[in-house]
Image (cartoon, grey):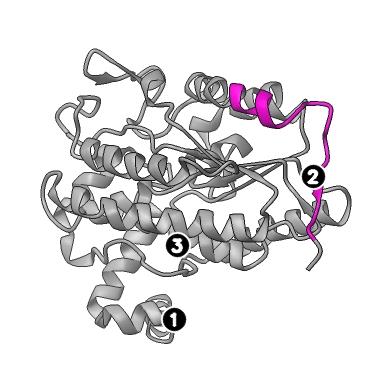
Amino acid sequence: MQAARRLFDQIKNNRAGRQTGLCFTAVLGLLFLVGSLRYHGDAAGHNSAQQQRKFLDQNKSFCPGPVTEPLKRPDSWWEPFSQKLAAEVAASDALQGSSLVFYGDSITETWRGTDGGHPCSRCTGVPEVFQEYFGSHYATAVLAVGGDQSMHQLWRMHHGEIFQKHQPHIAIVMIGTNDLGAASCLGKGEAPILQAAAGTADRVREVIDFLHQQNPLTHVLILGLLPRGSDPEDLFKLPSDYSRGIDAVNDQLERYAFGNKQLHFADCALSFTSGGKLLQDLMPDALHPNAAGMRLLAECILPFLKLYAPVEKHAGLPDMPH
């Protein structure tokens, strides 16, 4: 009860709390939701997509929907982990910077071998793939947190996860699937997810705009959202409730990047599907790629790196004078 009241006070005192007007009963439910699933919009990776969907279908009154402004999460582990990532940026920036930086949610955090800062079984073998494709060639930083929505990512950027002295050669951003996940509990089927697509794309653009404003010399590769399952009876079936929403977000992000020489878009989805199904051997939970899946994601990224980030240049670029 004391933990619930602390969470209530936190939400009450920030803008999101004032906007949503969550009552104390809903906060108790939200506390249970966070504690049970480490969920603030979608999966952080410890539970299957099927389990999460079932729980949310049974507890729709605890669904706040997508976060619409920069906001830190109430999870007790989240801010310390965010501070750890910011400290990594500061330490790297004080030396020569990082030439290749990754931003995102649990899928991107998998490169670190962790989920929410803790080792995870589904991450097995992924850091080795990362080292093979990226770590052995570039000075890298992985600034990603499991379960984050786009506005959580933007909050982290506002609080230390931007390089100030040495702009990266490349920043790779994949964020937004948790925004759609947060919308999924607002109704049944694909309708609430599809309705949330435009807002999700807008918020991802906010993230990219801020990154581009702060690091104008950096090439930004926007990775399209990966396909994911939704049907508890056939979790790997496509199209899923998410498919049209994901397509809509990706279409808007591709249009957004078009014509800007510093912004680029890549859709890696085809590597993970075949015959109207998600490939279970690449995405065992129908959401997070395993080591084999992350290898395919790395292969999708690699041609872009060869164009814009020569391997002989390990450090970041000097920053623009302010």
Three-letter code, disc 3: Met
Could you tell me if residue 308 is visible in this image? Answer: yes
Please give left or right for residue 98 compared with residue 117 in the image: right
296 over 146 or under it: above or below:
above
- Residue 10's tag is 1
Q: Residue reaching furthest top?
A: 275
- Residue under the point 78% across and 26% down: 311
Q: CA distance from mark 1 to mark 3?
A: 18 Å
Question: Mark 2 = which residue?
Answer: 316
Three-letter code, disc 1: Gln
- Residue 322's tag is none
- Residue under the point 81% across and 54% down: 93
Three-letter code, disc 2: Gly
Where residue 137 sits, quadrant-wise, is top right
Question: Mark 3 = which residue?
Answer: 151
Could you tell me if residue 77 is visible in this image? Answer: no
- Residue under the point 73% across and 56% down: 163
